[in-house]
Amino acid sequence: GAALSSPGSIHHDAGDCIPCVFYKKGKCPAENECIYCHEFHPELEGEGSKSARPSKRLRAQFKEKLDAIFLVREGELRDQALRDLAREHNYVRRMIAGIRPDLELEGYLREPPPKG
């Protein structure tokens, strides 16, 4: 296979990695020895996306949304609401995968914004 850009990139394809915030800025001090992922992360692109972990406020909002989904939704409606929420951020997708490992979330990542 292709050479990894950093040891932290080994689980990138499985979505189980932590992006390197320094690499995104073009100045990772650890370079190819970095324990964080140096691959493309669409959730870090776009306006207001500065780090892989959302702010405390945003994490609280995600938790409120998750709580509401489990409180008022059942069955397939709940599953679809979870999939829709998973599109908002890779962080919340990982939260949902931890709660519902049986729920199919592949393809439910945010798409990178169109160029142009």
Image (spheres, grey):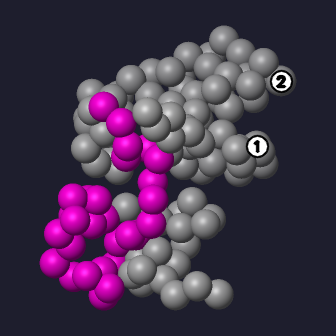
User: Could you give the CA–CA distance between mark 1 and mark 2, rounded to whole angstroms?
Assistant: 10 Å
Give percent across and percent down for residue 61: 39, 23
Give percent across and percent down for residue 87: 58, 33
Identify the image quadrant of the C terminus. Answer: top left
Q: Residue furthest front?
A: 116
* Marking on residue 103: 1
Q: Quadrant of residue 15?
A: bottom right
Identify the image quadrant of the N terminus. Answer: bottom right
Task: Name the residue at 58% across, 28% down.
Answer: 85
Q: Nearer the viewer, residue 75 or 86?
A: 86
Q: Main secondary structure of the magenta part?
A: loop
Task: Name the residue at 17% across, 69% down.
Answer: 27
Q: Is residue 38 magenta?
A: yes
42 shown above or below 46: below
103 shown above or below 19: above
Q: Residue furthest right?
A: 76
Q: Nearer the viewer, residue 10 or 66?
A: 10
| Residue 110 visible in this rendered orientation of the protein | yes
Q: Quadrant of residue 32?
A: bottom left
Give percent across and percent down for residue 17: 47, 65
The residue pinned by badge 2 equals 76
User: What amino acid type is highlighted by mark number 2?
Assistant: Glu
Do the residues bearing badges 1 and 2 touch, measured as CB atoms within 8 Å? no
Q: Is residue 106 magenta?
A: no
User: What amino acid type is highlighted by mark number 1?
Assistant: Leu
Q: Which residues are magenta?
A: 20-47
Q: Nearer the viewer, residue 114 or 110?
A: 114
Task: Name the residue at 28% across, 59% down.
Answer: 24
Label 2 environment density (alpha carbons within 10 Å; few <14, some 14–19, many ≥20): few
